[in-house]
Amino acid sequence: MTSIALSSAAPTGLKVDAVVVGVAPGDGDVVLLPGSETLDKALKGSLARLLGQLGATGKADEVTKLPAMGAAKAGLLVAVGTGPLAEAGTPARHESLRRAAGAAARALAGQQSAAVALPVLDEADAAAVAEGIALGAYTFDQYKSGDPTTPVESVTLIGPGVKAKGVKEAVTRAETVAAAVNRARDWVNIPPRDLTPATFADAATKLARSAKLDIEVLDEKALAKGGYGGLIGVGQGSANPPRLVRVAYRPSRAKKHVAFVGKGITFDSGGLSLKPADSMVEMKSDMSGAAAVVAAVHAIAQLGTKVAVTAYAAMAENMPSGSAQRPSDVITIYGGKTVEVLNTDAEGRLVLADGIVRAAEDEPDLIIDVATLTGAAVVALGKRVSGIMANDDDLGAKIHDVAGRSGEAMWPLPLPVELREKLDSPIADIANIGDRWGGALQAGLFLQEFVADGIGWAHLDIAGPAFSDKAHGYTPKGGTGAAVRTLVRLVEDVADGAL
Ligand code: BES
Ligand code: MN
Ligand code: ZN
């Protein structure tokens, strides 16, 4: 990963390949943001005009490159638009800085070193810039045979504020969190022939061991023996059998216990309720929830947050075959509830049900499940916003706030009790589909049936944001690592007693 250093030197004197400054929209020319003063001075005050001539407007995601023309030791100047910047201490400001840093990092691919002189007023600004750089520099080229463009190797954050107390710690945290997001992205991007439930479970095991976390993997035999009918049912059509992975972090003196449950469908063909060709292509990303929960518990352990966390990753491949489950089959979820499987493409809720019931056995205070669960959530909220559903409105509101502070767009959706009857089955305890209307909510209501009484539960439907069709800000094309940052921050809030 890109290494990040801190310096209070002037950007003009640093021996780097490129210098990044921020620009915001102005009345005429762009407004040069703090950090660019020495450069502008070296250019005799012409920087804003030069950038204007090159078409810069200062809007978000805009990158303008120009030769330094002797104004700095670096050969290249990069002006990145921030859009209008909000006041210090606001999530909106942090997200603008994060996105600008990310866009700059993407534009720096191929350069070895850079100095980033964005307007850093405090440690939260510095953390946002560091996070944006580490996330924006992400590339996935394992499957390219040629010379890949390498991400920028080292970045120095500069500005008068970066040497202040607390900045170093905040930047280290940002690097840890970004590494976790990038790890989740890698797992999502690996093609499904290489990331099967077994290889995914192996990768999770390796990661957990490296941090001395407890790890338990149930294979198909153990799952069948244990009565995990959701994972067995969904996985039975595939040559790649299912797994349930449990990763536990148990710090000393933890007062609370949070459980994560992630949907880990390594490929979702729909099963016998086969998806149309176009809808199938992105379905290697259907394990994004599992990737997020495993990466998040590892990051939380690295940060040493004083909360017990257990991540359950419910992994299966949903394929059609002679051994696949059929629409109208009845399966028994872990714990005994029966489900009539009317549509084999509504498989995520089946594996999550097993995971949620299992999670409750460990008696957590809170269960958060994360899943690319419904196309309906994408219809409702689009590709950039995840849905939050919870069995307690206050919990939903708190997660909304946590997500906002993490730079992740998530929005509360209701769980209307009246919709529950759509899932009534004439022969089993519940059916796995209802009708079209409010499909994301019906999926949420299905999951709620499996949450033990008295446990706070929230469900994050990340179907839209988990996979991006284009690069923007600090988000690459492909797997995004959605929900990792929110999960880490949420557990930190639990540790602080705020949740
Ligand atoms: N993995 C899909 C949901 C999905 C759709 C994720 C688009 C990302 C992008 C899920 O398993 C699924 O197929 N859901 C069905 C449910 C339906 C059959 C009730 C859907 O949304 O169509
Ligand atoms: Mn499906
Ligand atoms: Zn799915």
Image (spheres, rainbow, N blue to C red):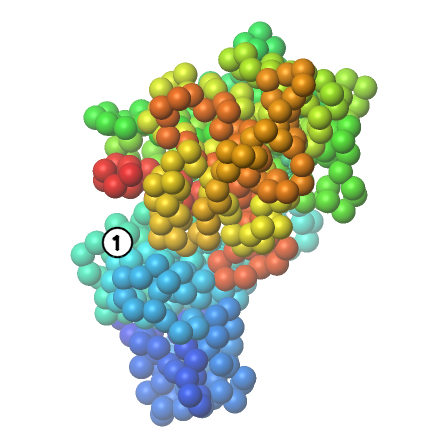
Q: Quadrant of the C terminus?
A: top left
- Asked which quadrant contains residue 10, the reply is bottom left
Name the side, left or right, on which 174 lies relative to 222: left
Residue 402 picture location, percent across and down: 36, 47
Q: Residue placed at 67% from the left, 40% from the top? A: 436
Mark 1, secondary structure of its residue: helix
- Asked which quadrant contains residue 477, the reply is bottom right
Q: Residue placed at 65% from the left, 21% from the top? A: 425
In front here: 112 or 285? 285
- Label 1 sits on residue: 168
Which image quarter has ligand 1?
top right
In front here: 59 or 335? 335
- Asked which quadrant contains residue 221, the reply is top right
> Which residue is farthest front?
418
Name the side, left or right, on which 122 lies relative to 393: left
> Which residue is farthest top?
225
Three-letter code for the amino acid on which mark 1 is drawn: Lys
